[in-house]
Image (spheres, helix red, strand yellow):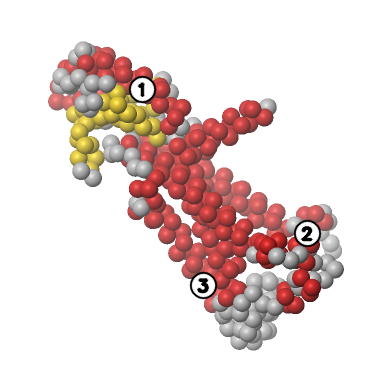
Amino acid sequence: MSGPRVPRLVRENGLVLFFGTIFVLALVGQAVAGFAEFVEQQIADGAHPVSFLAYLTSSDFGVDVAENWQSEYLQFALYVVATVYFVQRGSPESKQLDEVGGESDERQRVGADADDNSPVSARADGPRRWWYSNSLGLAMLALFLGSWTAQAVAGRAAYNAAQLRAVQDPVGLAEYLASPDFWSRTLQNWQSEFLAIMSMALLSVFLRQRGSPESKPVGAARDATGLEG
Amino acid sequence: MLRNRLALAAAALCGVATGCAVSAAPAVTTTAEEFGAALARHDGVVACAMLTDRARGDTETFGRSCATQLASLPDPGPVQGVEVWGDTAQVRFAADTVFFLRFPDGWRVGAAGCTAGAEAPYDCEVKG
């Protein structure tokens, strides 16, 4: 018995489509819940409640979104780069214990060791190859810095609006960057991301998820490192 | 069409990044100047009409009259600085600091007759 045929384009891009869909649903949910909370606060402050559209373009919504984005991109930037230099015995998240570092050109299939299917940038010499060789980590780093900057700018605007509602002076950007509000928002997200990565690296030594490339094969030995199921 | 999209994007960015401080400042300044002028001529009725409902209610406790209280506030002098963040604004007069909130019909005074305290909220004669 066979189910309905899934179009090839959907099947071959299932991971991106699945996470893209639940991302949008979660963002809409955050917007609706955040709007309700914001309106409650405005009424408590004696202000006029904003419209939903005004809330979507507000600094309050902006900072709530950006503070989570920055930590996720930091998580992946660190994950991509740290796994070059750090290994974890028994973890499928780690490479083999003797492969620490950027590895040989032969293993990485770059320059003279590139094969016919290698991207042009992998065959190139000099800066082009360097950029391409580090493009994933750099992209994550750029997305982290961009969303962290957005958090700082939107966070200051939201903080200053709250300051004025509480009849207190607004603050400059430098003062905001040294404020408990900025670092509380930042670090509460960082700590949870770091914990999640550490948990994944450690639990995947002992536990299995059959069929997942994030797990070792179910029957793999506990000290087998760098295997994906 | 492209211009409309750019305007929408600019409005969104303005809201997220600055709370539209630049675009809203002239409207706040105009309202602040009208409020300052009312205080300067001790016109408590006009000044009272510019308060938020909550601020007006705050002045009318224990049988006090809002107009009488507002008329007793000193001349704030000219506007010296305006900061707008989202739907809130702070206007510094030469002799007063006034806080505004944005409503559909314009800006209203949420707190007036305010003097700064060190690292603390302003101490205000009128505050809702």
Give the quadrant of the N terminus of chain B.
top right
Indicate the chain on which mark 3 is placed.
A
Name above or below for residue A9 compared with residue B73. below
Q: Which mark is residue B29?
A: 1
Q: Between B110 and A212, which is closer to the camera in this rendering?
A: B110
Q: Between A154 and B61, which is closer to the camera in this rendering?
A: A154
State the residue position of label 2: A12
Q: Which mark is residue A214?
A: none
Give the quadrant of the C terminus of chain B.
top left
Distance from disc 3 to disc 2, alpha carbons, whole Å, reads: 30 Å
**Disc 1 element:** helix
Asked if labels 3 and 1 share a chain, the reply is no
Which is more foreground, mark 3 or mark 1?
A: 1
**Disc 3 element:** helix
State the residue position of label 3: A198
Asked if labels 3 and 2 share a chain, the reply is yes
Distance from disc 3 to disc 1, alpha carbons, whole Å, reads: 53 Å
Type of amino acid under label 1: Thr
Provide residue B110's location: percent of width, then percent of height: 29, 28
Name above or below for residue A57 compared with residue A201. above
Type of amino acid under label 2: Glu
Query: In the shown orientation, is residue A118 left or right of residue A104?
Result: right
Distance from disc 2 to disc 1, alpha carbons, whole Å, reads: 58 Å
Indicate the chain on which mark 2 is placed.
A
Tell me which numbered mark, 3 or 2, is placed earlier along the sequence. Answer: 2
